Image (cartoon, rainbow, N blue to C red):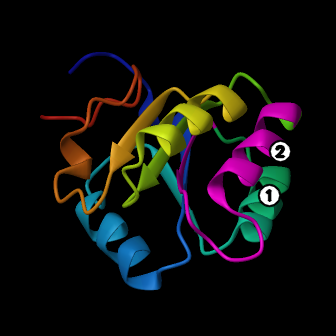
């Protein structure tokens, strides 16, 4: 073991596509950190009000509030949260805008069947006992 108490960390996943959220949930069920799931930006902000979130992974393209708008709000509420965009859109301009406008830490393309293997920042690296 690496001695990290994963239970004190929480990751929030946001995607308007319920099957995507279910797939993430299935893929991460053995991970020791707390996991929250939201199907909209509004729901994500509510979860953040009620819970201490350490890392947020958000889809880019969502109705009402897209990922950039959500992460801009997250940045104004709690700028130290590690922010990841998960998107199927690969336009270089869009990726650059995402990074510049929201101060995101990582941009992951989907579909990403290996999301659980993505190296999250310590202490979020998936545990491998």
Q: Quadrant of the C terminus?
A: top left
Q: Is residue 69 above or below residue 38?
A: above
Query: Is 91 drawn above or below residue 64 in the view shown?
Result: above
Q: x and y percent of residue 55 in the render?
A: 56, 37
- Disc on res. 45: 1
* Residue at the left extreme of this rendering: 129
Residue that numbered label 2 is attached to: 73
Closer to the eye: label 1 or 2: 2
Dot 1 or dot 2: first in sequence order is 1
Badge 2: residue crowd in 10 Å (few <14, some 14–19, many ≥20): some
Q: Which residue is located at x 36 percent, y 50 percent?
A: 90
Q: Quarter-wise, where is residue 47 in the image?
A: bottom right
The N terminus appears in which quarter of the rendering? top left
Instruction: Answer with left or right where residue 40 lies relative to residue 31.
Output: right
Residue at horizontal 30%, vertical 58%?
110
Tell me the SS state at disc 2.
helix
Query: How far across and down, in percent of the image, does residue 115 sit?
Result: 26, 50
Task: Name the residue located 76 percent from the left edge and 25 percent from the top edge.
Answer: 79
Q: Are marks 1 and 2 in contact (CB under 8 Å)?
A: yes
Relative placement, left or right, of 83 versus 119 is right
Range of magenta residues: 54-76
Does residue 101 belong to the magenta stretch? no
Q: Which mark is residue 99?
A: none
């Amino acid at each position: 073991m690496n001695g990290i108490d994963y239970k004190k960390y929480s990751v929030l996943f946001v995607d308007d596509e319920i099957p995507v959220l279910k797939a993430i949930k299935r893929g991460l069920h053995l991970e020791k950190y707390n996991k929250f799931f939201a199907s909209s930006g509004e729901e994500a902000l509510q979860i953040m009000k009620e819970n201490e979130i350490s890392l947020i992974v958000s889809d880019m393209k969502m109705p009402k509030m897209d990922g950039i708008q959500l992460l801009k709000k997250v940045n104004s509420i709690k700028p130290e949260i590690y922010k990841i965009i998960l998107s199927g859109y690969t336009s270089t301009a869009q990726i650059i805008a995402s990074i510049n406008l929201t101060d995101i830490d990582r941009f992951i393309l989907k579909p990403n069947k290996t999301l659980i293997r993505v190296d999250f920042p310590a202490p979020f690296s998936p545990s491998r006992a």
